[in-house]
Image (cartoon, rainbow, N blue to C red):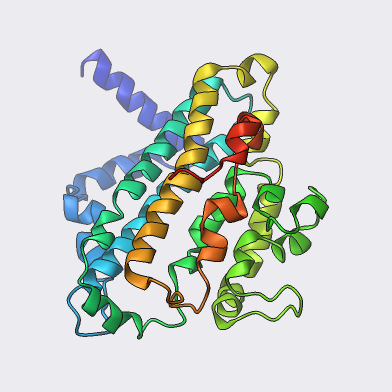
Amino acid sequence: MDPKQAAIIEQINQKYLDLDQNPDTHLEGLVWAKPITYWDYILPEALLSLQIQRTTQPDEMVFIMYHQINELIFKMVLWEIDQVSSSQNIEPAFFAEKLRRISRYFDMLASSFSIMGDGMDPEQYFRFRNTLTPASGFQSAQYRIIEFASTERINLIDQRFRSDMDPNAAPELAYEHLYWQAAGKDHQTGKKNTLIRLFEEKYKALFLSKMEAYHTTNLWSVFKQLPDASRNNEALVAAMRHYDYTVNVVWVMAHYHAAAKYLGDAAATGGSDWRKYMHPKYQRRIFFPGLWSEEELAQWGENI
């Protein structure tokens, strides 16, 4: 056995000893193990079995697959954010690289809306959309968690209530005033439509726990805790700004224009007036407000 092989065997041996396992048992198991294949690793058959149409309209398949791809990308985004949130003594280069990765994911999402915007027959869309009520893409739990993980919850409060809200308000109070509650909550009566009610029955407990978990570990809080030299790092600031604008203006408006093409003046499938909470100039969702000039903040979402 050459020295390199011996060193590898020793590393394997030590790995299993550290786990209080018999290394010989694991090594013998390798003799009988099957070689890995692409289909064992990626599981394409399982993945491709998840597209279940509710209608006979062919373009419904485009709609289903596109939204499933979105959810996979959202998982990638959260995977990168959590590496920042859980890091100790984070370096600007590491932080910036994670933000660049996240931004690339959202850049792809923004440019991909043409798949739906230009890729579905309007007549087919209006046939199958009526079978989806009250479901809505609004009900993506991962996207809501991305928001909690990106910024302090005060920045996600409905614009009408933000100035009066304590930045450290309890998650339950903040939750009831999040900007997207405008999709189905009457703030005067407290009544919520079916879209919101079903969403909360499924995910509210998770959302409250995530709001608490990310209270001081969201991207904006982590950035503000960095030393002055790190907060002034040009590459990191540029990456923060790109991510903020891409998610809250470019991607949102790509979604907005795709919805407008098909819906016109109609309500979304969940029954909401989607313009009230989607357009950035109304709710002014800004993850990192301290990185923008007063002029930039005043014109947020106006010119796209």
Q: Residue at x 71, y 46 (%)?
A: 215
Q: Is residue 249 placed above or below 256 in the rendered structure?
A: above
Front-most of 268 and 82?
268
Front residue of 39/197: it is 197
Give percent across and percent down for residue 166: 82, 51
Q: Is residue 216 above or below residue 10?
A: below
Q: How many marks?
A: 0
Q: Position of residue 60 (x, y in %)?
A: 24, 74
Q: Is residue 261 above or below residue 291?
A: below
Query: Taking 236 as reference, is 30 left or right?
Result: left
Residue 101 sits above or below residue 94 on the image: below
x 27%, y 76%: residue: 125
Instruction: Tell me the residue at 20%/19% (across/down).
Output: 1
User: Whole-percent x and y of residue 277?
Assistant: 56, 62
Residue 157, percent from left and from top? 69, 55
The quadrant of the rendering that contains the C terminus is: top left
Q: Is residue 269 left or right of residue 189?
A: left
The reply to whether residue 88 is visible in this rendering is yes
